[in-house]
Image: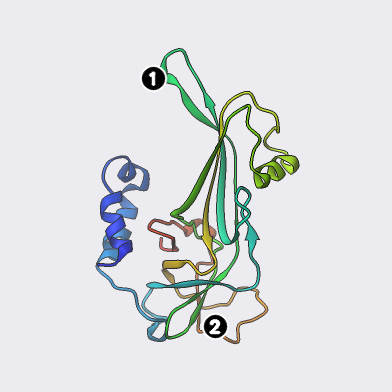
Amino acid sequence: MSLFAGFLLCAIPGAFMAFVGVGHLWNYARLRQGDPVSIRELDTSSGALELEGTARAHEDTSRSPFTDTQTLVHEWTVEEYSPSPSSNSSSWSQLASGDDRHPFRLEDDTGTALIDIQGGSPYLQSTKTITVEPDESPPPAIAQFLQYSDQVDREHSRTRRYTESRLDLGSPVHVYGPVRNDAPETEDLASIDAVIGVEDPDRGFTVGEDTLDFSN
C-alpha cells in the first residue's frame, strides 16, 4: 500500500467523509486498489493513472507569500482571532485567501510527465502557520505581503495567523489523473513523455499527501 493510500484510510472517517462525499469515496477505493505506474508504462487508453515521482519546474515558479519560498503550487490564508467572554464561542475568521499554481514536471526513473495543474485541486501537506500578535512586528515576508495587499489591513488589534501550503521544487509528489490527448500551450515539450490533466476545470478534486487528483 502506498503512503497515499495509507493517508486516505486515516482521513476518511468523521467530518472528512461528510466533506468529500460518497462520489469521491469511490475514487479513494479505486486508488487504493492500484499501484503507481512508471511513466514508461503509461497506457493512454486506461483512463485515470496513478504516478509518483519528484516535482520539477517546467517553465515558471512563484514565491510563497509568508516564507518567500520558491514553489510550483501554493495556497494561503489569513485568519484573525475573534475572542469572546465565553471561551466556547471564540473563533478564527478568515480575512483573505489565495493561491498560485504552475504546470510542473513529474520525474521518475523512467521519464517525465507534464502535470497540467489547471483544473486540479492540490492537497498540500507542507504547511507553515505563522502567528502574529497585535503588538508584534511581522516577519519580513509577511510585512511585504501586507504592504502590497488590498485584501488585508496592515494594522490590526487582534491576533492573526498566516498559513501557506506549498508544493516545493524537488518535493515528492503523487498524482492521480488521466493522460491528456492534447498538449496545453507550452514552449518546451521535447523532453515530455506524457501530459497529465483535464480539459474541464470543474472536474478536479484532490486528496492525499502532496497530491494532485484530476479524477471525476
User: What is the three-letter code of the residue carrying label 2?
Assistant: Ile
User: What is the three-letter code of the residue carrying label 1?
Assistant: Asn
Of helix, strand and loop, which one carries label 1?
helix
Label 2, label 1: how many angstroms apart (C-alpha)?
A: 54 Å
* 33 horizontally vs 21: left or right: left
**Quadrant position of the C terminus in the picture:** bottom left
Residue position marked by numbered label 2 in the rendering: 192
- Count the marks: how many? 2
The spot of residue 153 in percent (x, y) is 70, 32
The spot of residue 61 in percent (x, y) is 63, 65
The spot of residue 26 in percent (x, y) is 29, 58
* 21 horizontally vs 56: left or right: left
* 130 horizontally vs 13: left or right: right
Height in image: 139 above or below 72? above
The spot of residue 160 in percent (x, y) is 57, 32
Residue position marked by numbered label 1 in the rendering: 88
Q: Quadrant of residue 116?
A: bottom right
Q: What numbered label is drawn on residue 195? A: none
Q: Quadrant of residue 155?
A: top right
Q: Which mark sits nearer the N-terminus, 2 or 1?
A: 1
**Quadrant position of the N terminus in the picture:** bottom left
Q: Residue furthest top?
A: 85
111 and 131: which one is in front?
A: 131
Of helix, strand and loop, which one carries label 2?
loop
Q: Residue at x 47, y 58 (%)?
A: 204
Q: Are marks 2 and 1 in contact (CB under 8 Å)?
A: no
Q: Is residue 164 visible?
A: yes
Height in image: 160 above or below 143? above
Q: Name the front one of labels 2 and 1.
A: 1
Q: Residue at x 50, y 20 (%)?
A: 83
